[in-house]
Image (cartoon, rainbow, N blue to C red):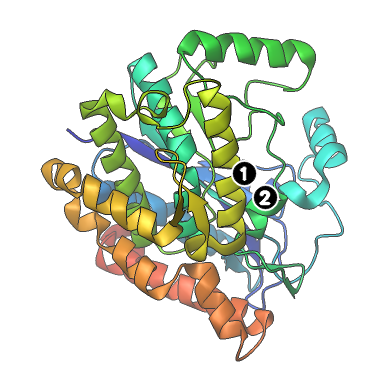
Amino acid sequence: MLLSKGFEVEMYTGTPAGEVVGFSDKIVAELDGFVREPDKRNVEYTTAPFCRYEHLLCELIKPRVQLRRYLQTFGDYTIIPGSTLPLGGADTFHRSDPKNPYHDYIEQTYGTDVVTASIHINIGIADLEALMRACRLVRLEAPLYLALTASSPFFDGNITGFHSTRWHLFPQTPAHVPLFESHLHHIRWVEAQLAAGTMQSVRHLWSSVRPNGDRRPYNLNRLELRICDLVSDPLHLLAVTALLEARLHQLLAHPELDPLESSQLSAHNRSESLLAIALQNEQAAAKNSLNAEMIHWQTGKPIACSDWIRQIYDEVHPFAKQAGIGCFLIPIKQILRDGNQAQQWLLQAEKTNPTEVIQQAIAQMHQQESLIAQQICQPLAA
């Protein structure tokens, strides 16, 4: 049985030349389903939860088609791929709602380090302790999903030396987020953070993965993977999601896969040791993505990131096949073979420059979305 899935998609708007220009204050006033971020140069939409991947594909594309049409009413404006301000503009915060006190806090505390674009993948799990177990496993393997999706090698006009400059810069908040050992542990920890002011609200928990729900931290019903850079290719995003879902099916069938149970690390202070490995692997993924050397949480030994992904792919493929989603996994092998978006852009930049690479990517993204809208989401093409 398939799990329900939905996406939160943050994107930049701007010109075909790659200049990021903010319209979110206007977009959220005119288009349903879009919400503003503190900086108006990026805007977010959320897809309704669906189980079937065919539905998810159209839910990803439809808002972009609507957004592109709306942007054209202002002139020659479009959607810009990537997860950091690629060609400039990082020196100034462009407020979307100058009267919002929370936005005051964000600007003053973090500046433009938070003006990023990303994909948050939400997957429904109703059982609370199974959800906490899933969060523990995915927290340890989140760097692999960052490696597959890295798309921010450029920032403010420069090649940064990171494949995900976004995750390198992004302020994970609070500074220390434990592996939650139970739902009660999560509740008490969140309440303590709110009381101490290290979290401004229940939303102010910015780590690679977190439990989510309608009344956090009490009513929870889904896992939210927050680490992924913006994935422009929707088929690649569905592949990453299928890999994650298949891994969760494996965990639901084999709860002993829980890192607190199955890690070979010393039982003494195992939780903190696992957390240290996760953070080290996240930075390795931000730096070198699929080329990174990581530490496997089960063995504590080094492993090449791409080899680890292949290992998990082989493990979960029977679960994906049983769920009827094996075909959606196929692009994972393509990403491993050809490189993620950051790696491809860096190869192109060796022959040109970041500006030309981004301009070409803008055109390709538009072309691909138009093709999918016409061929699969037919009514949109009218």
Q: Can residue 221 be seen in this view?
A: no
Quarter of the figure with residue 336: bottom left
Q: How far apart are marks 1 and 2 (CA)?
A: 6 Å
State yes or no: discs 1 and 2 in contact (Cβ < 8 Å): yes
Picture coordinates of residue 127, whole percent (x, y): 33, 16
Few, some or many residues within 10 Å of mark 2 (<14, 14–19, 20+): many
Residue 32 point in image, percent of width and height? 51, 42
Which residue position holds label 1?
28
Relative side of 375 to 86, left or right: left
Q: Give the camera-side residue of 40 and 303.
A: 303
214 left or right of 311 in image: right
What residue is at 81 percent from the left and 42 percent from the top? 110
- Mark 1: which secondary structure? helix
> In this rendering, is residue 330 above or below 367?
above
Quadrant housing the N terminus:
top left
Residue 371's disc is none
Could you tell me which residue is drawn at 56 percent across and 21 percent down?
269
Residue type at mark 1: give it. Val
Q: Residue furthest bottom?
A: 351
On the image, the x and y values in percent for residue 276 come to 60, 36
Q: Residue at x 79, y 18 (%)?
A: 197
- Name the foreground residue: 74 vs 154: 154
Secondary element at image label 2: helix
Vertical relation: 192 (above or below) 252: above
Disc ID at residue 24? 2
Nearer to us in this view, 312 or 269: 269
The amino acid type, in three-letter code, at marker 2 is Ser
Residue sitting at x 79%, y 37%: 106
